[in-house]
Amino acid sequence: MNSNLIQKYNIPGPRYTSYPTVPFWDESGIDINVWKESTLRAFQESNDTEGISLYIHLPFCESLCTFCACHKRITKQHSVEEPYIDTVLKEWHLYCDLFDARPKIKEIHLGGGTPTFFSVENLEKLIHGIFKKADRLPDFELSYEGHPNNTTEKQLQALYNLGSLRNSFGVQDYDPKVQIAIHRIQSFEQVKKVTELSRKIGYTSISHDLIFGLPFQTEATIRDTIKKTIALKPDRIAYYSYAHVPWIKGVGQRGFNDNDLPKDNEKRHLYELGKQLFFDNGYVEIGMDHFALPTDSLYKSMKNGKLHRNFMGYSSGKTKLMIGLGMSSISDSWYGFAQNEKRVETYQERVNNGEIPIFRGHSLTNTDLVIRKHILDLMCNLETTWNDKLPIKTREQIIYRLQEMVDDDLLELFDNKIVVKEKGRMFVRNICMAFDLKLLDKKPETRIFSMTI
């Protein structure tokens, strides 16, 4: 690691799960009719070839984790489950009424919140309800996020029976002091139990999510966490940088002092340490924060040039149309984005009134689409190829902004493409920022992003 480069480039910046990023969507939003036209266009272009994807947000959690920046609702009242599932299915029916053919679904992902907050009966009701108005493609995949403390064997078996071969467990860290600070207390034995049960049932891709940069983490605690993780040999490991954004999420991320967090070089050392331990045990780095065994589909998609990135992070495939169902979900038609209402009550009220419940969005311009493709290629493949769709002046300005990173030996510029060097992988968010015309144009006066490194 070059500590000077880390100090230089560790600035606030987007994670680029989309372009434009949400803070720079059009202030006027997206007209509902424009959104419907965009959705139908993407559906007609892709349903018969690649199918569509669904992201379903299940927002309820029984307790608050103080590292979490997701939209959630904390409750122990499971009576909220059935009305929420009913509303999600009503929202799905609104989209199905928009389509001119029966949807063919390639992928469903259940995110949260805590999807395993929901009972087997309601999870079955949800998935069966989706397929009353849709068909599965032969390579259909159902995936979900599970909490190790409340994921039962019955849930694992039921979701497997519904078509899931892949799940993900949020581990974060095994150190007791760290767990107390982030209010996420779970034992290695519990994670081991749900991991082994998943394998016994037949899951072929099990992922563990870890976070570096959490309060009180040290080299010794990270070594111990990764040692325990490696012992269970998950097929994928997401090793995320903790995004400390208390100005956005309020008290949920103020359960500890800023002084308790690893800083700059210290934080990056935790990532490099983890990366080397993953390498030593047969994992391959995918993108900027994922690792996979060579037998996993995420690795295979990277080797085949099919790795994709969206609001769910990295995935092994893409569909042009991804519909987000549920409170706060974001939909992506490739030509536009739309986000649902963030409050459960408002979301349910609008759906029950027969409305697709979006409250903000963005319709992509031709320039947006070109920049989006460049950033997607950099985030997934660490290179991008120039084309003739960008104005010469715009391309020259991007190259000018990249020049300092060329001088720092982070990337190479060729006549027809840009290639990120291995040394530059940790700075890929900074490299993408050179392409981000919205960010450069608006130059936010207050901090709205987490640090890039």
Image (cartoon, rainbow, N blue to C red):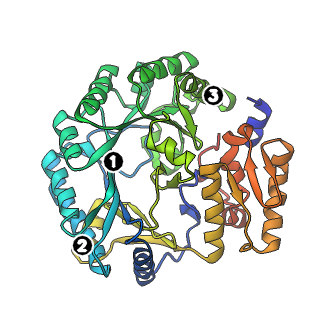
Can you tell which quarter of the image residue 440 is in?
A: bottom right
Give the CA separation, mark 2 to mark 3. 46 Å
* Residue sitting nearer the eye, 29 or 45: 45
Lateral position of residue 243 relative to residue 235, left or right = right
The residue labelled by disc 2 is: 93
Residue 74 in view here: no
Q: Is residue 250 above or below residue 268?
A: below
Question: Which residue lies at the image location 30% right of the left edge and 20% below the top edge?
Answer: 189
- Nearer to us of marks 1 and 3 is 1
Can you tell which quarter of the image residue 6 is in?
A: top right
Give x and y (percent) for residue 204.
34, 38
Q: Secondary structure at mark 1?
A: strand
Q: Quadrant of the C terminus?
A: top right
In the current view of this chain or complex, which residue is farthest to the right? Answer: 407
The residue labelled by disc 1 is: 143
Residue 272: mark: 3
